[in-house]
Image (spheres, rainbow, N blue to C red):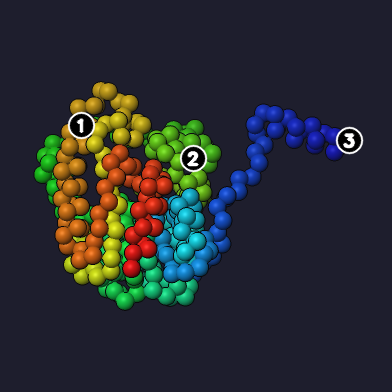
């Protein structure tokens, strides 16, 4: 009788949507931890492959899983590993150690302990800070660099934006998630996908939700990572900087491009940001001795998601150059 009742209950829950199948990460990788400092471990994903070591570094607030849909495209010729910096996801969350110098030492220690040898660094967004310092300080340990909308002089960029906008443009703020949006991980995934307008890997969103909570802005790491002027002239390795370029309101995220009330302010923002960003691209191209720039118009900041195939083709072509 108890089995009959239990079976009936399970059937009722399934019919009402209360019972969900366990979600599994579809990406092929092996996960592990590497200690970089006493009581500080970094979580990494090894996607496999043989050949030169290609190490991927996510943007601020993200995890190694950010590359789950991108990294496998390189395992035919490279050994691909992605690393989550301290303070995020499954990596340790210590109270300190979030300055760029320490993060670079974390990365270097992880690379050494994983026996990756001389590496190719591929980084998204804020990872450009770590890549710049790593390449300038340890030139013999990096063979090439790929910046995924990551090569910015953030100090100069912020100054240019302040000059361009002495009065803040009238633009909308990204909608905060509602209680319903954060009630379950499935709901939060839907919220992120809807507001960003593209499919950021679900594994990354789920990992952040589980270990960091949805309100990422309160983390110590967000408050501590600072900007520094990039040592471009000290970078000797060949470097490719892929930039996402916004030309019109229609290319913005959904919550912006559908807001007609603020269309004028958004156009002003696009114009001012692009003028500053163009100077950033020129700075990289003229100061990095072996620097190359690829501009992708209409690209999202998550350029390796919004224009995945184009970025993969460009990166492979760059990496295959002697």
Image spot of residue 251 (x, y percent): 30, 34
Q: Which mark is residue 267?
A: 1
Tag 3 residue: 1
Q: Which residue is mark 2?
A: 189
| Residue count near mark 2 (Cα–Cα under 10 Å), binned few <14, some 14–19, many ≥20 | many
The residue under the point 17% across, 62% down is 287
In the image: residue 2, left or right of residue 311:
right
**Cα separation between marks 2 and 1:** 29 Å
The earlier-in-sequence mark between 3 and 1 is 3
Q: Residue at x 26, y 47 (%)?
A: 295
Query: Under tag 1, what secondary structure?
Result: helix
Residue sitting farthest toward the right: 1
| Image-based side of 55 in relation to 27, left or right | left
Residue 107 position (above or below residue 186) = below
Regarding residue 144, the answer to whether it shows in the image is: yes
Q: Nearer the viewer, residue 227 or 239?
A: 239
Crowd tier of the residue under label 3, counting other residues whose Cα lies within 10 Å: few below 14, some 14–19, many 20 or above: few
Give coordinates of residue 96: x percent, y percent.
36, 64
Q: Quadrant of residue 193?
A: top left
Q: Is residue 280 above or below residue 141?
A: above
């Amino acid at each position: 009788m108890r089995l009959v009742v239990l079976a009936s209950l399970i059937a009722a829950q399934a019919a009402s949507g209360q019972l969900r199948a366990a979600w599994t990460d579809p990406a092929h990788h092996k996960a592990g931890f590497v200690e970089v400092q006493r009581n500080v471990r970094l979580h990494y994903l090894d996607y496999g492959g043989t050949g030169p070591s290609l190490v991927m570094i996510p943007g601020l607030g993200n995890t190694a899983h950010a590359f789950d849909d991108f990294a496998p495209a390189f395992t035919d010729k490279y050994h691909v590993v992605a690393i989550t910096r301290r303070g995020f996801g499954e990596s340790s969350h210590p109270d300190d150690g979030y300055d760029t110098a320490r993060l670079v030492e974390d990365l270097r220690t992880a690379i050494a302990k994983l026996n990756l040898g001389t590496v190719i660094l591929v980084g998204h967004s804020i990872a450009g800070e770590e890549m710049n310092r790593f390449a300038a300080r340890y030139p013999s340990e990096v063979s090439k660099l790929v910046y995924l909308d990551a090569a910015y002089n953030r100090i100069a960029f912020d100054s240019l934006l302040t000059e361009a906008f002495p009065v803040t443009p009238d633009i909308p703020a990204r909608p905060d998630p509602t209680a319903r949006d954060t009630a379950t991980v499935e709901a939060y995934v839907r919220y992120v996908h809807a507001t960003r307008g593209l499919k950021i890997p679900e594994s990354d969103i789920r990992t952040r939700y589980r270990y960091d909570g949805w309100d990422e802005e309160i983390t110590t790491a967000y408050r501590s990572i600072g900007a520094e002027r990039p040592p471009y002239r000290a970078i000797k390795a060949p470097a490719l900087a892929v930039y996402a370029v916004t030309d019109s309101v229609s290319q913005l995220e959904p919550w912006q491009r559908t807001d007609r009330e603020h269309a004028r302010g958004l156009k002003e923002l696009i114009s001012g940001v692009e003028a500053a960003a163009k100077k950033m691209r020129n700075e990289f191209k003229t100061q990095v001795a072996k620097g190359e720039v690829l501009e992708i118009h209409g690209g999202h900041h998550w350029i390796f998601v919004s224009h995945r195939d184009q970025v993969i083709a460009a990166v492979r072509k760059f990496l295959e150059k002697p």
